[in-house]
Amino acid sequence: MLFERIDYTTSPLPRKEYENCTFKNCNFYSTDLSNFIFRECVFNGCDLSMVVLKNTTLNDIRFINCKLLGVQLSECNSFLLSFGFENCILKLSVFYRLKLKKTKFVNCNMQETDFTETDLSSAIFETCDLQRAVFYATILEKADFRSSFNYSLDPERNRIKKARFSRLGIAGLLDKYNIEIE
């Protein structure tokens, strides 16, 4: 089912389960989607900034060209939680303590995003801006950062075994030492 160009800030989305749906160019800004269930859905070109997701089920969800500013994704129902992001703005969003193994982030602006205590094993960060993103006690084993930039993470405070970084990105692993690399 296709939902296109609907402003859910003036006409709330009916509370029910949504499966195999596409939301295209819809406005969800600051709406309350608590306890909703979304399975195998695509959000394309939507504004989900400041949306409330308390106990919301997001199972096999794709976000494409979406804006998710300040979204507390850590409040979602963690059971079967799975999603991917492509060309999205995720500034100031929070993924605290989520299990996001193999999650893909492609060409995303993730400035000041919080990944504290998140399991990002085998996650892919492809061409993502991670300026001031927070990685603390984060599991990054086998994660791929090779094409991403502006990240700063402490190898002593995060698990990075077999994570992949580019030579240019190595500086982001040494920031805490306040050294200059030429």
Image (spheres, grey):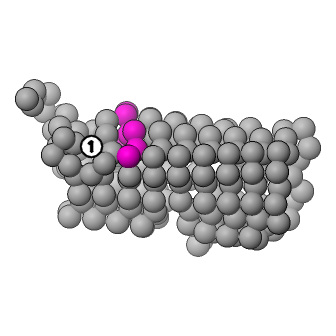
Residue 120 in the image: state x and y as whole percent: 39, 60
Whether residue 78 is visible to the viewer of this picture, yes or no, is no
Q: Where, by quadrant of the figure, is residue 78 drawn? A: bottom right
Label 1: few (<14), some (14–19) or many (≥20) C-alpha neighbours in 10 Å: many
What stretch of residues is rendered in magenta? 127-134
Residue drawn at point x = 42 percent, y = 56 percent: 118
Q: Where, by quadrant of the figure, is residue 23 drawn? A: bottom right
Residue drawn at point x = 31 percent, y = 60 percent: 143
Q: Considering the whole magenta stretch, tell me its main secondary structure.
A: loop
Residue 147 in the image: state x and y as whole percent: 31, 48
Q: Secondary structure at mark 1?
A: loop
Q: Give yes or no for residue 128 being in the magenta stretch.
A: yes
Dividing the image into 4 quarters, which one contains the N terminus?
A: bottom right
The foreground one among 42 and 93 is 42
State whether residue 69 is above or below residue 53. Answer: above
Whether residue 49 is visible to the viewer of this picture, yes or no, is yes
Residue 169 falls left or right of residue 150: left
Residue 35 falls left or right of residue 42: right
State whether residue 157 is above or below residue 9. Answer: below
Residue drawn at point x = 47 percent, y = 39 percent: 109
State whether residue 69 is above or below residue 38. Answer: above
Dividing the image into 4 quarters, which one contains the C terminus?
A: top left
Q: Count every numbered label the image shows and give the total.
A: 1
The foreground one among 74 and 21 is 21
Residue that mark 1 sits on: 153
Residue drawn at point x = 70 percent, y = 45 percent: 46
Residue 181 in the image: state x and y as whole percent: 9, 31
Residue 49 in the image: state x and y as whole percent: 66, 38
Residue 97 falls left or right of residue 4: left
- At label 1, which amino acid type do we have? Leu
